[in-house]
Image: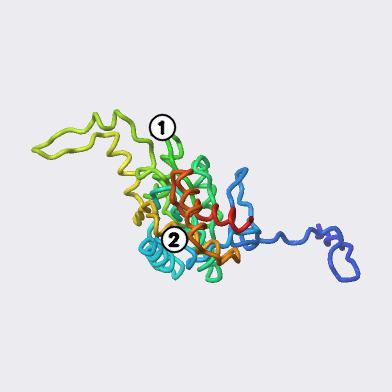
Amino acid sequence: MGITPPREQARGTDGQVLGAQPPAADPLSAAWAFRWRERRLQPITHVQAVALDALLGIERQKQALLDNTQRFVAGLPANHALLTGARGTGKSSLVKAMLQRFGDQGLRLVEVPPHDLIDLPDIVAPLRERSERFVLYVDDFSVAANDPALMALKTALDGGVEAPPDNVLIYATSNRRHLMPESRRDNAEYHWVDDELHPGESTEEKISLSERFGLWLSFQPFDQERYLELVRLHLAALGDRRWDETTEKLALRWALERASRSGRVAQQFARHWAGR
């Protein structure tokens, strides 16, 4: 029995097969930043630009994360990072600044909501073996003790049966030092052993989670002098370089009304004052 020759496909004047679908574009080459939403990676086309020089009062934290990220981009060993402390002190902005600093060297940022950490295996799967270096950015992370995301994060940090990819790190920010709520029962579990105070099992569990991050950076509230310096910086960025006693008093009153002298509050006042 002979072999039936393949049917000739119709072609256009340019030689292309009519009706053929064009090759799918690589979605991970479409942008520098992505968000995990509806169980897929979505490109972020308008990425918030944060300059390292605009982040004041956190020089030690800035240098530590910069060094860690630089090693990661260079393909050298680097650590997952946990940024904790007072609100509005630059934790999230510092992570975003890494993208602007190293994006042209292959760094990519993937924003993952805390409740979607249970999808970590699906998030990481398409990133493995790629040439880019991916930071999974988890902002305002806080979970309950029985949250499924907790076990998913532990597995991602320590590694399960499957080896973690070398080109993926987790950078998480949290207002909680141990990522989980502190309860009155935790204090009741403390006990004395040979004149030494030891935490109970609940506290140990919370500490063990935060200790899985190799780089742990703490952010303290700004003092008045640093707050005013941030106000002047944000005003200058908005083209308003006027500064007098009245502006200073109003900036301090703005912070007092909000019970916070954070970088976020300084930026909000600058927008209010420059907008007038």
Q: Residue furthest front?
A: 245
Circle 2: residue type: Asp
Quadrant where the image shows the N terminus: bottom right
Q: Please give the label number shown on residue 166.
A: 2
Measuring from the top left, give residue 210's x and y in whole percent. Answer: 34, 47
Q: Nearer the viewer, residue 213 or 18?
A: 213
Q: Left of 73 or right of it: where is 27?
A: right
Q: Residue at x 89, y 62 (%)?
A: 10
Q: Is residue 128 visible?
A: no
SS of the residue under disc 2: loop
Residue at image location 38% in from the left, 66% down from the top: 63
Give residue 163's position: percent from left, percent from top. 41, 53
Q: Residue at x 52, y 71 (%)?
A: 105
Q: Quadrant of residue 217?
A: bottom left
Front-lying residue, 92 or 209:
92
Residue at the farthest left position: 194
Q: Residue at x 87, y 71 (%)?
A: 14
The answer to whether residue 101 is visible is yes
Question: Secondary structure under badge 1?
Answer: loop
Q: Which residue is mark 1?
A: 146
- Left or right placement of residue 61 versus residue 42 in this view: left
Q: Residues within 10 Å of mark 2 (few under 14, many from 20)?
A: some
